[in-house]
Image: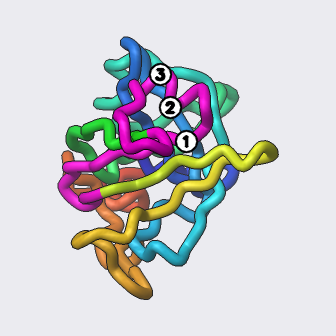
Amino acid sequence: MQKHDARNLHYDIRLSIGGTLKSWAVPKGPSRDPSVKRLAIPTEDHPIDYASFEGTIPEGEYGAGTVIIWDKGTFENASEDDDGNEVPLDKAYEKGHLVVNLEGEKLKGGFAFINTGSRWLLVKVDDAHAVKDDSLLDDEPASVVSGKTIGELERGE
Ligand code: MN
């Protein structure tokens, strides 16, 4: 997950599915509070190696602004149909009901990506990693790679 200070600050969550990075831009960022639904706007697929990008996209280029790797890790598919059978990731994505268990440095446990028909929502699954009134975004603003915040990276600290 990248934190991206472009025209509007947002978080880009990217999942490696089928050899590409399926991507959503989450304007308000993820929440570990299951009662909070966050708008997740699908964006274009990115190549796998983009997940390790941290730095500045020059003025005039698409997405111009500063990017840090806010979180990284692995995930497992936890998508199931109504009968409790596992649904493959690509099918779950197509159906618009994708559930993954994250094993990140900051984010852990289940997160659901739900396509309501008009928009995608990102919602924490109510599990042992759920946190009421979550303040993670404020508490841990820095990159898990460089340890820098977006501001520190922009100022070259
Ligand atoms: Mn972005």
Q: Is residue 141 above or below residue 33?
A: above
- Residue type, mark 1 in image: His
Badges 2 and 1: C-beta atoms under 8 Å apart? yes
- Residue type, mark 3 in image: Asp
- Residue type, mark 2 in image: Ala
- The percent position of residue 134, horizontal first and vertical second, equals 40, 81
Q: Which residues are magenta?
A: 81-109
Badges 2 and 3: C-beta atoms under 8 Å apart? yes
Secondary structure of residue under mark 3? helix
Residue that badge 2 annotates: 92
Secondary structure of residue under mark 2? helix
Badges 1 and 3: C-beta atoms under 8 Å apart? no
Residue lying farthest right? 118
The span from disc 2 to disc 1 (Cα, nearest Å) is: 5 Å
Place residue 15 in its image quadrant. top left
Q: Name the side, left or right, on which 145 lies relative to 135.
A: left
Ligand 1 sits in quadrant: top right
* Quadrant location, the C terminus: bottom left
Q: Name the side, left or right, on which 73 lies relative to 79.
A: left
Secondary structure of residue under mark 1? strand
Q: Does residue 36 show up magenta in the picture?
A: no
- The percent position of residue 122, horizontal first and vertical second, equals 54, 55
